[in-house]
Image (cartoon, coloured by chain):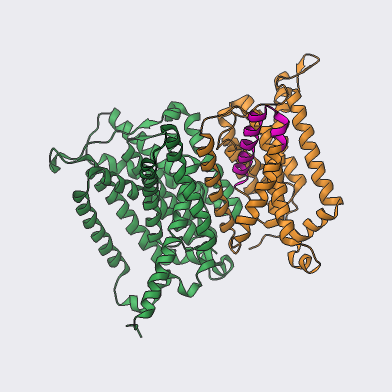
């Protein structure tokens, strides 16, 4: 059972919308998701021209976080496995991209295909790590799994310091990224290009995830989460399902980490601390476990909250030292507090509240379906 | 050989602290079926309170006592204000709430005290006494052993021999029956949280002088080590937690002494995974029928 099942009776779960006959008439799930992704892509390109460069960069960061939060939503929300180690998986992807891009740069290689190649390498390496952790995770339950993934989250940044010959210790590595292609014009803003790259990668990942969730595999994920015994009786290989969920989730987390590294053009162990792992979990829980839209809210929160607290601390006239302390810690405190309140008062998160609101509005109108 | 003796003593001294911390985890697990992931952060908060009192009054011992009292209070407050209201239908919920507490406590500490390392003073010398030319125990190690010994035997005596201990065990074992028999189950639960958090605060006071010092994240790795210790012993077994703590302490001491201190986090992870994969119930638990 996951957090959502505690709050929402199974019949009202938004996921079940896909199973209703009304949705059958809308045709193929893949086509519908493709259409959504295409629209989102067009909107994203439009937005990238409409807003200033800094906002472009922020949107790109949201996209990168969305990869990780969506993966975690699949794992925790749909499969019921709690991972505190997704920051470490992001670090794996980020370091892989850094090593690949540096290797390409050292050999003097250039070309538009190098970055996609590095991103694929990042996904492959996190899939490998995710498979190892996932095999262990499939045998563990509840607090044990949380403990192991917590250890992973603490250990992986320490590894970067231990093997500083490869990973350059606390300083980390820089990630050389090529400028936008000349075909776009000489004055094409770099941030807009960053948004295009991360946006494209993220939309592709979201398309694949959304389809996976609605597929046979997605149903087995949920079945294992809701009742392992029943799932096993129904012929589902529980351990294999759990490993698959972990691997998928690791792959997207790795992609997210890789995109973050490309955006920041650097990686360091400090960027992937235990706090990041906790932040990711907070984000998906507050956003709403169990739906990809919840992951989107979570990713937006991750970027917006530090920005908001920054503007708040700027409005108050504080001494620089106090302002600095507040700025680093206020988002953490707000996140922690919100998390506790959400878990106690509204386990469905933002998305849960929104769909409850939506249902309440729909219920007032005479239904077209009946 | 000298080195081996030194590392063994050092490992046992650290292990005693991990044992106390693991014992605190086991206390809450037995009473409420919750692994308190916020225990490290709560213990650091108590240690910061002690730091404030000690620097204001100049007395280490006043700070020491205040830390334990602060730990007890914090545990009770966390149970009454937060954990009591969490839906326990899914094992994920209490874990997530505890992690929210971690973020909240660490952020508040960072806001109040800043995130620089502050020195944590030790009440006794940490340089080792030599016995027959071999450096063995430091006075501080003796202090650690004595304190942990008193606490562990005190808890054992309380649970085995006192009416309160009996009620606490009953409330944890069969809450409904205990309630019918007139046991204040909620009160026992709060008492369990307070005791565990007090022991955690004590462990933090003992371990921080041997670490880098006070920092909002100072107990992150200690928590992971103590969790490993509790798992090695089996989360349900207090004697297991003590043995697990000593095992983890020795392992970490040998690894950092012979292979380098950078590798200790990795060693903890490997041990944790190995124990969980081979004996999920812990090394000292009887092999129970697994829930399928």
Q: Residue furthest right?
A: B161
Please give the name of the residue rendered at 25% of the width and 29% of the height, measured from the top-left corner.
A108
In the image, B81: left or right of A255? right
Which color has been applied to chain B in this rendered view?
orange
In the image, A241: left or right of B260? left
Question: Where does the image place residue B8, in percent across and percent down from the top left?
Answer: 72, 27
Chain seen in green: A
Q: Is residue A236 visible?
A: no
Nearest the eye: A18 or A187: A187
Question: Where does the image place residue A93, in percent across and percent down from the top left?
Answer: 40, 42
Q: Residue furthest bottom?
A: A370
Q: Is residue B64 magenta?
A: yes
Quarter holding the C terminus of chain B is: bottom right
Please give the name of the residue rendered at 22% of the width and 45% of the height, measured from the top-left corner.
A52
Quick check: A214 above or below B214?
below
Quick check: A11 above or below A92?
below
Quarter assignment of residue B129: top right
Quarter assignment of residue A139: bottom right
Nearest the eye: B49 or A210: B49
Nearest the eye: B104 or A28: B104
Dominant secondary structure (helix, strand or loop) of the stretch shown in magenta: helix
Question: Where does the image place residue B12, in percent across and percent down from the top left?
Answer: 73, 31
Nearest the eye: B105 or B98: B105
What span is in magenta? B38-65
Q: Is residue A347 magenta?
A: no
Quick check: A307 above or below B65?
below
Quarter holding the N terminus of chain B is: top right
Q: Is residue B96 visible?
A: yes
């Amino acid at each position: 059972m996951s957090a959502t099942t505690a709050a929402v009776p199974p019949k009202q779960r938004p996921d079940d919308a896909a199973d209703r006959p009304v949705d059958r008439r809308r045709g193929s799930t893949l086509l519908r998701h493709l259409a959504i992704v295409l629209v989102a892509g067009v909107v994203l390109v439009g937005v990238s021209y409409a807003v200033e460069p800094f906002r472009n960069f922020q949107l790109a960061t949201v996209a990168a976080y969305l990869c990780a939060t969506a993966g975690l939503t699949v794992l925790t929300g749909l499969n019921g496995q709690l991972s505190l180690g997704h920051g470490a998986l992001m670090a794996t992807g980020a370091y892989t991209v850094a090593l690949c891009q540096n290797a390409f740069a050292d050999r003097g290689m250039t070309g538009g295909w190098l970055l996609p190649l590095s991103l694929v390498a990042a996904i492959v390496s996190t899939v490998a790590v995710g498979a190892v952790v996932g095999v262990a995770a499939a045998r563990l339950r509840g607090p044990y799994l949380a403990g192991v993934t917590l250890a992973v989250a603490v250990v992986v940044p320490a590894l970067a310091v231990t093997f500083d010959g490869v990973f350059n210790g606390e300083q980390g590595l820089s990630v050389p990224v090529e400028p936008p292609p000349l075909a776009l014009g000489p004055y094409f803003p770099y941030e807009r290009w960053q948004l295009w790259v991360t946006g494209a990668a993220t939309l592709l990942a979201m398309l694949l995830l959304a389809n996976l969730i609605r597929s046979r595999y997605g149903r087995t994920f949920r079945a294992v989460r809701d009742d392992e015994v029943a799932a096993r009786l129904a012929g589902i290989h529980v351990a294999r399902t759990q490993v698959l969920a972990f691997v998928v989730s690791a792959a997207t987390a790795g992609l997210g980490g890789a995109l973050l590294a490309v955006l920041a053009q650097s990686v360091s162990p400090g960027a992937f601390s235990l706090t990041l792992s906790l932040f990711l979990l907070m984000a998906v829980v507050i956003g709403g476990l169990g739906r990809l839209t919840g992951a989107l809210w979570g990713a937006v929160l991750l970027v917006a909250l530090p920005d908001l607290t920054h503007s708040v601390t700027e409005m108050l006239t504080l001494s620089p030292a106090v302002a600095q302390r507040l700025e680093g810690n206020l988002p953490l405190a707000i996140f922690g507090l919100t998390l506790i309140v959400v878990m106690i008062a509204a386990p469905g998160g933002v998305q849960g509240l929104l769909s409850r609101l939506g249902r309440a509005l729909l219920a007032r109108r005479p239904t077209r379906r009946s | 050989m000298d080195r081996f003796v030194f590392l063994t003593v050092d490992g046992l001294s650290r292990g005693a602290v991990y044992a106390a911390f693991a014992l605190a985890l086991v206390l809450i697990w037995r009473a409420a079926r919750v692994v308190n992931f916020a225990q490290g952060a709560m213990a650091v908060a108590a240690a910061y309170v002690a730091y404030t009192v000690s620097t204001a009054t100049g007395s280490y011992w006043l700070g020491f006592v205040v830390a334990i009292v602060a730990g007890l209070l914090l545990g009770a407050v966390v149970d009454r204000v937060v954990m009591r209201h969490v839906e326990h239908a899914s094992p994920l919920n209490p874990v997530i709430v505890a992690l929210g507490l971690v973020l909240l406590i660490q952020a508040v500490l960072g806001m109040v005290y800043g995130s620089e390392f502050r020195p944590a003073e030790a009440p006794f010398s940490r340089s080792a006494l030599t016995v027959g030319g071999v450096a063995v125990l430091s006075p501080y190690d003796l202090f650690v052993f004595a304190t942990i010994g008193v606490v562990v035997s005190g808890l054992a005596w309380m649970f085995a021999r006192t009416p309160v201990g009996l009620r606490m065990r009953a409330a944890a074992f069969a809450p409904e029956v205990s309630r019918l028999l007139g046991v204040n189950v909620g009160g026992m639960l709060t008492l369990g949280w307070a005791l565990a958090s007090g022991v955690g605060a004590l462990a933090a006071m003992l371990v921080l002088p041997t670490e880098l010092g006070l920092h909002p994240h100072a107990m992150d790795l200690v928590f992971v080590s103590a969790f490993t210790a509790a798992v090695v012993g089996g989360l349900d077994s207090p004697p297991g937690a003590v043995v697990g703590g000593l095992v983890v302490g020795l392992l970490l001491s040998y690894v950092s002494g012979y292979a380098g201190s950078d590798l200790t986090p990795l060693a903890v992870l490997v041990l944790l995974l190995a124990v969980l994969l081979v004996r999920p119930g812990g090394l000292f638990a009887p092999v129970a029928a697994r829930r399928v």
